[in-house]
Image (cartoon, rainbow, N blue to C red):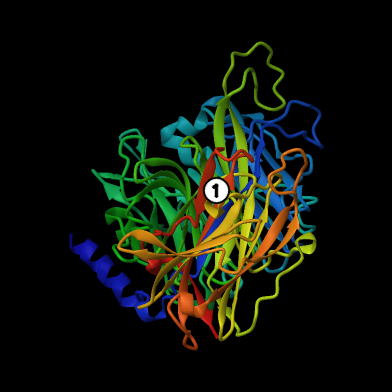
Amino acid sequence: MRTRHLLITLLAGILSVPATADVDRGTVRIAWDKSTYQEMTSAPVCNADYSIEPNLYYPRAKHLSDGSILLTFMNDHFGFDIYTRKSKDGGKTWSDAKLIRHSYSEESTVGKDKRVFVNPEFHQLKSGRILLAWQWRYIKGYNDLPNTNQNCGVEMCWSDDLGETWSEPREVYRGRNWEPAFAELPSGEIHMYITDSQQIRDGGSYAATSLLRSFDGGKTWQGKELATNKDVEIISRTIWNGRGMDGMATAVILDDGKGIVAPIETWSGRDVYEQSPNLIRTTMEQNWRCDTVALRANGGPDFPYKKQVHKDIKGFGPYSCKLSTGEVVILTNGRWKDVGGVFALVGDRMGDNFSYITTAFGNGSAYWGSIDEINPNELMATATIRSNAGPMPAAGDATVGVKPQSRGKIVMIKGWLNRSREIKKGALKMQKVSSFNPEGLWMLGKVALSKVYADFGYDSKYFYFGSYLFDKDIAAFAPQNSDAGGILLSRPGKGTFKVVVNAKGDYTVYKEVRSSWQMLAWEYGKAETELVCTINDDSDEDIGYSALVKLPWSLIGGAPAKGEKIAVHQIHYHKNGVAVKSGIRFEETEGENSDYPGEWLTITLK
């Protein structure tokens, strides 16, 4: 107990909790784009002497410095072979798979065995070099527990041409582990985080989160060409009911020297802990250095240096990325308020206050995903889904007549980044639908293959709401019985309003009065529209339309003050056909509560 208190005191003396005055909350929301969803169930292999497509598991898709996207994955639930693919068009199409590492027979401490490869993960350094690492292990030898640390390790290779070619792999770490991942500090120091499962007790593994450091671009780790389990630095351990089990860290270096944060999962086959995933943090000065002996023996660090990512999420397999504007995003599979899926949480620039939860994949069986900003407007999320798809041996295995087994496939989707905005005084000029550029605008497009974008402007007379809607079949009857865009708009002390506009230019304006909508205006002068469609005609294929609504300030609470912040919640109506009674699907900004404007994005009048 005394050691435990000593550890807490040491950490408290070096770490500092972010000051709430520095926190920038609520500036980003993720809108998932259904039109970008895709599944990879197979992949031709370009550099192997077999044609059987691999199983697809453990996807990691991240942008490279030239704008391309690199994808890594493995071909079995617990690994065997490592592959890469690339996309040069933002993830629409992918190259053939490239085999990086193939399993093979070899002797281990138990005799004849097979060496297999698992958990591929990569990182592009500031120099342009890409480091790619994975766990290796012997299938049988891994479970030879007295010798397990001799039968497992980390291998790594690198690419200096954006993943087109790769160096020969070499072993850099020897010891029982899972899930290596990288981070590069501004100083050039490189971290390799691992799930450190070297400690075995009562026939089980007591895992922790540990790291290895490189100061020469990844050539050596802890100053050695081959580091071992004796060299790792433990940085987090969760102990529960006598067992210690956490890992799967992916770290983010915060902007402006604010420190390092890493989400981790906490789990085991015997105990599943409801606080998972957790977030651990350190300052740049501390750089994860602490009393490792005490940490391994007693667990830690303690709150707030290790805490739940969010009280309502119980998840596993967390993955993190940093947006170009500095906010941290975490993807995790699990359950949110008893709903299963893969969820994204948006934090602030301090790597804290995670909220605005959205569902990237609603399939409760999806897991082991990644997330990364692929350009300043978009994220890409991936996940694994297991499915029964008939006979499928491991890639390259000539086994014939095997029984149907559970196969893995990769799912992907893009998310649009909606951000709070500042707008200068002046009338809003609408874009041509035919040459529309969505950059910087707000988007919704998750409920159907239909997208709606919102833009804003203001002058002394009007608040301008510009709506662009793209769909193959445009219907318009009453505004809320149409393919229509809209917003909820809240002004402190002046009320909350709703505006909906359709392709005919018809729009309605409501004011909230004691949880009901009071209509203020119907067809208030008509919106200005541009149609690249035929309305209520399902015999052709439409493109879309734009509509500009000029809201008199007198209708929505009176003249604005300079610098006023208006809270706005975007909405989208999608009509499933042109029949008057055909169904309507409703969408709104996910991650916000429509009854609480304090959670909405804001428009600041400059």
Nearest to the observer: residue 73 or residue 224: 73
Q: What element carries label 1?
A: helix
Amino acid, disc 1: Asn
Residue that protrudes farthest toward the top in the picture: 401
Dot 1 crowding, Cα within 10 Å, few <14, some 14–19, many 20+: many
Residue 60: in sight, yes or no?
yes
Which image quarter holds the N terminus? bottom left
Work out whether 242 lies above or below 348: above
Residue 525 in picture, x, y percent from top left: 60, 69
Using residue 294 as the reference point, say whether residue 545 is left or right of it: right
Nearest to the observer: residue 130 or residue 598: 598
Residue that protrudes farthest toward the left in the picture: 1
Residue 258: in sight, yes or no?
no
Nearest to the observer: residue 133 or residue 449: 449
Using residue 403 as the reference point, say whether residue 178 is left or right of it: left
Which image quarter holds the C terminus? bottom right
Nearest to the observer: residue 510 or residue 250: 510
Using residue 499 as the reference point, say whether residue 156 is left or right of it: right
Work out whether 545 lies above or below 425: above
Residue 592 in picture, x, y percent from top left: 43, 59
In this figure, which residue is indicated by the disc labeled 1? 481
Residue 181 in picture, x, y percent from top left: 55, 54
